[in-house]
Image (tube, rainbow, N blue to C red):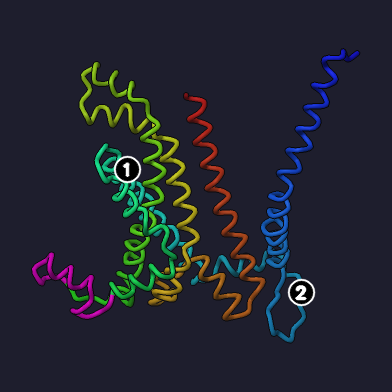
Amino acid sequence: MKTRGQMPRFRQIQTEGIAEWCMALPALLGLLLFIALPFLFAVVLSFTSLKMGSPLPTRFVGAEQYHRVLTAPSFQRALLNNALFALAVVPLQTASALGLALLLNIRLRGIAVFRTLFFMPVVFPMSLVAVIWTLIYAPGPGGMMNSLMALVSGGNLGPWDYLHTKVLALPAIIVMSVWQGVGFQMVVLLGGLQSIPAVLYEAAVIDRAGKWGCFCHVTLPRLRNHLIFTALVTTILAFRLFDQVRIMTRGGPDNATTTVMFEAVRAVFERQQVGAASAMTVIFFLIVLGITRLQRMLVREEREIS
């Protein structure tokens, strides 16, 4: 039997529960309308032979659509390019961001200006950045990158056509992507560095730890979750690689820079193969889901250890 003091408490909890659902409802509706339903629609279409403008009726083809997509040489090359891009960008960008965060985590007059300058490329639209870097990679001895390489090597290297040479096109996009995205990781790691209590460094110094010892035994362990977060977000973004490829190389030369997203867009807008594009989207979702699950497993392990 409830007492007089328990009844207002019960009503307060009930009222808070209703308020929480009311505040979450717009976000839940947005997720349902713009993410869940379109994805479910894509899953359904991926099992059909739907092709825009085709006089043939749409029919259910089941897993055959996935077999066609996964055995297509262009899609296999896209998966390989995405994997190579992620394997190169994630360690390069994470290490660069950590170095920048350590450099910018000092008390210096005007340090906010330097932080802003390094973060500024993240704010720029990718289309603008891609156009600028296309000009930087201009072929011929007059191109900015070729001029820089000639200056550094004393005229022994180059000139090259970076975006139209098979072995150079993907590395050129990797360099540009690292430059554009390193500022985001730097801000996350800088926030992590500033949350480390100074007393830990003082204790390490008392134990006669040098700067390298402080970095290995204090900084890196305390930044572990930040590093996992930035590395896995960068991996997910690496698999979404599209804008740079579309603007700078259009997947060429000879599919050297094509990606999963680029193949999906090309399937639906150039070949009108809606079913095939939907299957590529579902495969892409499963890859991202696997990476997210890996992230949750690593973070859970860290919490159990701590």
Q: Is residue 142 left or right of residue 268?
A: left
Q: Is residue 265 magenta?
A: no
Q: Is residue 186 left or right of residue 14?
A: left
Residue at which label 2 appears = 59
Q: Residue furthest right?
A: 1
Q: Is residue 141 magenta?
A: yes
Residue 215 picture location, percent across and down: 28, 31
Residue at x-position 40% and y-position 70%: 128
Residue 266 picture location, percent across and down: 54, 75
Q: Quadrant of residue 88?
A: bottom left
User: Mark 1: few, some, or many residues within 10 Å (few <14, many ≥20)?
Assistant: many
Residue 139 picture location, percent across and down: 26, 79
Residue at x-position 28% and y-position 77%: 138
Residue at x-position 46% and y-position 52%: 235
Residue at x-position 24% and y-position 16%: 206
Q: Which residues are magenta?
A: 138-157
Q: Residue furthest bottom?
A: 55
